[in-house]
Amino acid sequence: QVQLVESGGGLVQAGGSLRLSCTASGRTLSSGAVGWFRQAPGSEREFVAAIRRIGSVTYYADSVLGRFTVSRDNAKNTVNLQMNSLKPEDTAVYYCASGGTSFSMDYHRNAMNYDSWGQGTQVTVSS
């Protein structure tokens, strides 16, 4: 299994930026991709972004495209999510997850394809 720990959440005003980090331990080489998901109160968990281990191919939800950037530092077993131009609707608990990978872009948007999850970190964007 891969153990994941998120960090970097907090309170920020609309238009501001935050950088989330997801640090992995355990069988990190077994991870084909790392995804970011978020869940707001009263809402279902939704896909945010993902990055493949090999080739660092990235995927983004339409709602964050152009504002968020996912990257990885393989030497540190860390995946980062840079969030710019934050909006109040970005407020949620953010989770990173490790799973397999596929040539299909839709594969990485499906939470069912991830088998290891972090504890989540709260992001609150005030208006």
Image (cartoon, rainbow, N blue to C red):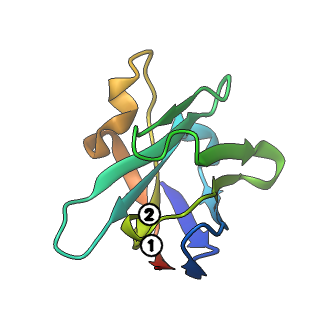
* Crowd band around label 1 with a 10 angstrom C-alpha radius: few (<14), some (14–19), many (20+): many
Q: Residue 74: give x, y in percent of width and height.
A: 77, 44
Mark 2 residue type = Tyr
Side of 109 where 80 appears, left or right:
right
- Identify the residue position indicated by label 2 in the image: 95
Callout 1: SS: loop
Using residue 7 as the reference point, say whether residue 45 is left or right of it: left
Report which residue position mark 1 lands on.
120
Residue in the picture at 36% in, 47% down: 47
Q: Is residue 85 left or right of residue 55?
A: left
- Of 49 and 3, the residue lying toward us: 49
- Helix, strand or loop at label 2? It is strand
The crowding category of the residue bearing disc 2, from other C-alpha atoms within 10 Å (few below 14, some 14 to 19, many at least 20), is many
Residue 38's x, y, as percent?
37, 61
Q: Residue at x 40, y 38 (%)?
A: 62
User: 63 or 8, which is in the foreground?
Assistant: 63
